[in-house]
Amino acid sequence: MAIKQLLVSILLTGSVGAALATEPAYPTRALFGDTHVHTGWSADAGMDGAIIDPVTAYRFARGEEVHSNTGVRTRLARPYDWFMITDHSDGMGTINEIVAGHPDMMAVPTLKRWRQAIMEGGKAAASAKSELVRMQSNGELPREVTDPKWMASAWEQTVDAAEQFYQPGEFTTFIAYEWTVNSDGGDNLHRNVIFRDGAKRTRRLTPLTTFVTQDPADLWAWMQDYEQSTGGEVLAIPHNGNMSNGRMFEEQQFDGSPVTAEWAQMRARYEPLYELTQIKGQSESHPSLSPGDDFAAWDLWDRGNLILKSKPAGSYPGEYWREALKVGMRIERELGVNPFRYGANGATDTHTGLSTPDEDNFWGKFKTLEPRADRWNFPVLEGVSDSYMGWEQAAAGTMGVWATANTREAIWDAMKRRETYATTGPRMTLRLFAGYEFSDADLRADLASVGYARGVPMGADLLPDKAGRAPSFLVAAMRDPQGANLDRIQLIKGWVDAQGKTHERIYDLAWSGDRQPGADGKLPPVGNTVNLETARFQNSIGAPELMASWTDPEFDPGQSAYYYLRVLEIPTPRWTLYDKVRLGAQPDDSVPLVHQERGFSSPVWYSPGG
């Protein structure tokens, strides 16, 4: 079905699934979900006062009305297609015992004081939560919190909740947890561990904690052991690297030793995706790394790590996806393996149990940041000399997965092969195909059919052409049916030259309106229809869909390269503007009220060696 026909069908039926009654062998629909959700069973979430449990979080994700942690009724405008709970393995289940006043916990003065703070709520709870994060980052947690005996029951109930709500074909759940490394006092090296399997293989396992190890290589070994001992399958998604102080993509092993081919192979095998946008800002790129990118300075959390420890000089290259994609190809020239071959993932990292990436229904990272007039000026993370404030929260992201069915197996397999894309929340549709024979004529055909038949999709490798031709691309984007029109489609290329130096370039492939690039080659802004008094916008600018075919004019068959799409919407209200209009918030002039939401495809990689 061609994109224009599909758009009409979606508008008539209200969903992609209903518009596609007959499924061909290749994926025809993007399924949306969240890979990063904490409930009150995570220690820091519960410390802040969250009481929503996994069962309630699943009910909310599939569209049911629930009460928030502050007692307000809420629901999603659109249910998710798939979902998972990723509570921290560190301390899983302990917060429940602290809140309940278990005698073993109350015998520890720190834990007794924390319980009192939780009962008091507000800034007392937020302060206790920050203390918890600092102590965990510095390895100072009381042994009562690190005892794995508290985890067993909580993990089994987490597995049971995922099984209870799994409805193949309608709503898919995954069994998962977060492994939470805060090395060197708060450097974020967290990973979400996601199983393809059900309760039979996962119920009795003990999730790995950082009380056992903080080395990611040990996590990969744990995952390998799980697969070999159970016959199951598992993958991990590293979190936003922008708070790792340069360690997420450092060119050495965790202990400082040189990277090896074996280390790179394990990382590439078990980590196919990377979380490039979530509540704590973005990790696509940074203005200092991409000075020619007019859209690099968005949702920046770049002042320190999780406890606001200042960044060492030269940290940024080890924190951002676009740079890591380039460095990975350079390492591949040396080791024969690319350890940073990451597809695109977006998620929320909510700690309320409520996954709400839509700007007009944003419930914040913590209970203390659920909707109220002053939350813009309430701290999200506190450090010794700095804090991230409420207004700096992004309404996070979601991930579209090109899967052949709404099942664990099909969605997990799509994640594994990187046929995914991230957005900052909108459920837009992105397509990227690479080959050697695409042309404008293909835009009038069934794009997916042509793309899969004569090329490869996002997340795949494009093999060298025997005739040495430059790669051609078919790209398409369609707006969220309930969202804003599109500004432009960009293709972002990174490559490694013969001397091993890395480069990047951004191409505008398709855009709305009759704008023309200026003398500097850049497009004029699309415009802005946002009404700051009503928090409304109009789709009188932009385009509902954009598409293009394109051939790389600067292709060198001897150079490794990657290509990914970035799609920008027209300007729309930020959640801070909705708070101002609805709740009477009075943010100061430094607080952004308007932004441009966006989406990112997984790359296609080209290597001279195939």
Image (spheres, rainbow, N blue to C red):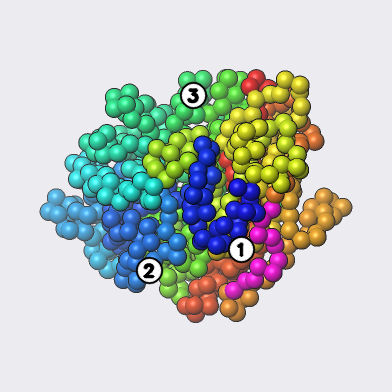
Q: Please give left or right for residue 427 compared with residue 214 in the image.
A: right
Q: Position of residue 443 (x, y in %)?
A: 71, 45
> Can you identify the residue that label 3 sits on?
265
The residue at the far front in this view is 22
Q: Secondary structure at mark 3?
A: helix
Any mark on residue 484, and which?
A: 1
CA–CA distance in space, label 1 to label 2:
23 Å
- For badge 2, the amino acid type reads Thr
Q: Position of residue 116 (x, y in %)?
A: 23, 64
Of callouts 2 and 3, the N-terminal one: 2
The residue at the far right in this view is 519
Q: Position of residue 274 (x, y in %)?
A: 51, 41
Predominant SS along the magenta part: loop
**Residue 110 in view of the camera:** yes
* Position above or below: 32 against 468: below
Can you tell which of label 1 and label 3 is closer to the viewer? 1
Asked if labels 3 and 2 touch by Cβ distance under 8 angstroms, the answer is no
Name the residue nearer the viewer: 593 or 6.
Answer: 6
Q: Please give left or right for residue 13 compared with residue 366 in the image.
A: right
> Can you identify the residue that label 2 sits on?
74
Of callouts 1 and 3, the N-terminal one: 3
**Residue 241 in view of the camera:** no
> In the rendered structure, does residue 540 fall within the stretch colored magenta?
yes
Q: At 48% across and 52% down in the image, what residue appears?
A: 17
Q: At 60% across and 24% down in the image, what residue appears?
A: 332
Q: Secondary structure at mark 2?
A: strand
> In the rendered structure, does residue 525 fall within the stretch colored magenta?
no
Instruction: Report the span colored magenta.
Output: 536-546
Q: Quadrant of residue 424?
A: bottom right
Q: Position of residue 77 (x, y in %)?
A: 45, 65
Name the residue nearer the viewer: 405 or 195.
Answer: 405
